[in-house]
Amino acid sequence: MCSQGRNTSAEFLTALIKATKNLIKPYTLSLLRVVLPKASDPQLTMSRYMIECIGLLAVVGGEELTPHIPEIMNVLLTALQDAQAPAAKKDSALVTLGQVCANTAYVVEPLVEHPELFTIFARMLKTDTTPETRREVLRVLGILGAVDPYMRRKVYTHP
């Protein structure tokens, strides 16, 4: 399939999940297994739509996605840290991170397990000029919740 056809298919799948949440629910894990590897596709449009699909599947499937959180976090962190990635892909990864965390009850742990998130969020707040991106960073931080400073200090000083 040509690149244009793949991008159209990815866009269609994203729209389909948005429009038919109740019909898609039984197929959430099957779709996730297909979408997850494609989220790292070198084709930027394809990977952006697949990242959006992951977020939508998290909204639909909720805690069913919990066993796949390590894989999902790897994809999202890679997208957020990619200096070459366009802003649209990073924004999709940020929104998806919020959707995954909010719908799978994966809160607080991401900040402890992935301390690089603090650096990523700080960089996004400093360098991104769009108010929407800044608002989304703050929204995701709110979803993730507060980290106990004592526990954070304990984790970083005693490995």
Image (tube, grey):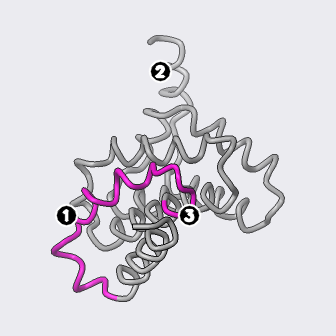
Near mark 1 (Cα within 10 A), the count class, few <14, some 14-19 or many ≥20, is few
Disc 3 marks which amino acid?
Thr
Task: Determine the residue positioned at 33% across, 41% down.
Answer: 70
As measured in the structure, the alpha-carbon distance from the residue carrying label 3 to the one carrying label 2 is 38 Å
Task: Determine the residue positioned at 51% across, 50% down.
Answer: 145
Task: Determine the residue positioned at 62% across, 38% down.
Answer: 118
Task: Determine the residue positioned at 34% across, 65% down.
Answer: 58
Q: Is residue 159 above or below residue 86?
A: above
- Residue where numbered disc 2 is placed: 155
Disc 1 secondary structure class: helix
Disc 2 secondary structure class: helix
Near mark 2 (Cα within 10 A), the count class, few <14, some 14-19 or many ≥20, is few
- Looking at the image, the residue that sits furthest to the left is 26
* Foreground: disc 1 or disc 3: 3
Q: Reading the chain from its start, which is encountered first: label 1 or label 2?
A: 1
Return the x and y of residue 37 as percentages of the image width and height: 35, 50
Q: Which residues are magenta?
A: 20-46
* Foreground: disc 3 or disc 2: 3
Residue 109 is inside the magenta segment? no
Q: Is residue 38 above or below residue 28?
A: above
In this view of the protein, which residue sits in the foreground, 86 or 3?
3
Disc 1 marks which amino acid?
Ser
Residue 30 is inside the magenta segment? yes
As measured in the structure, the alpha-carbon distance from the residue carrying label 1 to the one carrying label 3 is 22 Å
Near mark 3 (Cα within 10 A), the count class, few <14, some 14-19 or many ≥20, is many
- Residue where numbered disc 3 is placed: 45
- Is the C-beta separation of discs 3 and 2 under 8 Å? no
Quarter holding the C terminus?
top left
- Residue where numbered disc 1 is placed: 30
Disc 2 marks which amino acid?
Val
Q: Is residue 98 above or below residue 70?
A: below
